[in-house]
Image: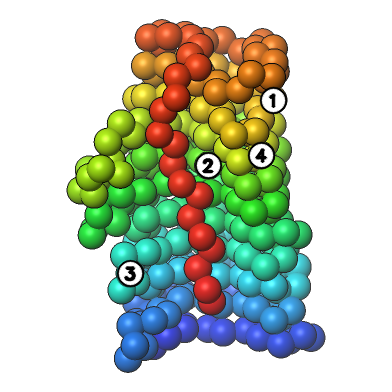
Amino acid sequence: MARNQTVGLEVAMQNTRVTLTDAVVVDTLPDVNKEGGYGIFVHAQANATLTRGRFERNHATGLAFSGSAPAQLNDVVVRETQEDAKANATALLLADGAVTEMNRLLLDKNAVRGFLVSGANTQLTLNDATVRGTLPDSKWGFDGTGAVIADHARLVGARWAFQHNKSTGLIVGEQATVDATEVSVTDTSRAPCYLAPDCDGLLTMGIVAIDGGRATLQRFIIARNEGVGIALADGGEFDLTDGEIAQHAVGANIVSETFDVGRISERVNYRDNGQKLSASIVPLPKVPVSPAL
């Protein structure tokens, strides 16, 4: 499927089921109002099963699941998702109670955001995933975040690599939870950011837990993310076991009077950071609003 308008493939309504193998959806364009351009959109309790898929240069969203029945995807590549008219994009989007399992996922060089999981009862089970090279938006030079988990959503799984993204590797906020093993977040770098004063003082970060978000990681490495390895504020929580936080200005920035630092210290090696721990008040990334679909 190539150069369609608005949506490459839309699957909707309860009891609708689509099974795809070796699917290619590329270059989907926005409509005349400059909206849409999605590769695949599954919603309204529809169900999709996909084995081997490639989604390239679609607009706004490569893959979108909203209020969908449980979906299963294996061996999927989403690459070079383009911004919409508002300079926003998300390569993979789950919202409004969508439940999806994905195995062997590559998100590569997508604009603005690798993936966003948002909304109560929304859950992504993700195994063997790489999110790399996410790009900031072209208008403000901001974002480029690997992934955002927000608004009571849940992300679980194993073997994730976040590599060479911009601004922040992973954000967990708004009572969302992340529970994973064998995770690496490395080489996140600063976005150019043209929008002063919102850019002032922003630090590049590996993983951020804010607004009651909680991240539980076992066997992990968080390294070379410039400013801060992990950051916690506004009721955010971390539970870290068997890992390394290395080569940052600050290993862990904890803004909380009650958080027990023992929860981020169980067989965790803090190595070659300018400071191991800090409690500085620093600007934190904002959790984006899930786009209307």
Q: Earlier in the sequence, mark 3 or mark 1?
A: 3
Q: Earlier in the sequence, mark 1 or mark 2?
A: 2
Residue at horizontal 33%, vertical 83%? 34
What distance separates the C-alpha of mark 4 from that of mark 3?
29 Å
The residue tagged 2 is 171
Name the element at disc 1.
strand
Disc 4 residue type? Answer: Gly
Image position of 202 with respect to 24: above or below: above
Q: Position of residue 198 (x, y in %)?
A: 30, 44
Image position of 222 with respect to 63: above or below: above
Quarter of the picture containing the N terminus is bottom left
What distance separates the C-alpha of mark 1 from that of mark 2?
15 Å
What distance separates the C-alpha of mark 4 from that of mark 1?
13 Å
Residues under numbered marks 4 and 2 in contact, where contact means CB atoms less than 8 Å apart: no
The residue tagged 3 is 86
The residue tagged 4 is 212
Residue 239: mark: 1
What distance separates the C-alpha of mark 4 from that of mark 2?
12 Å
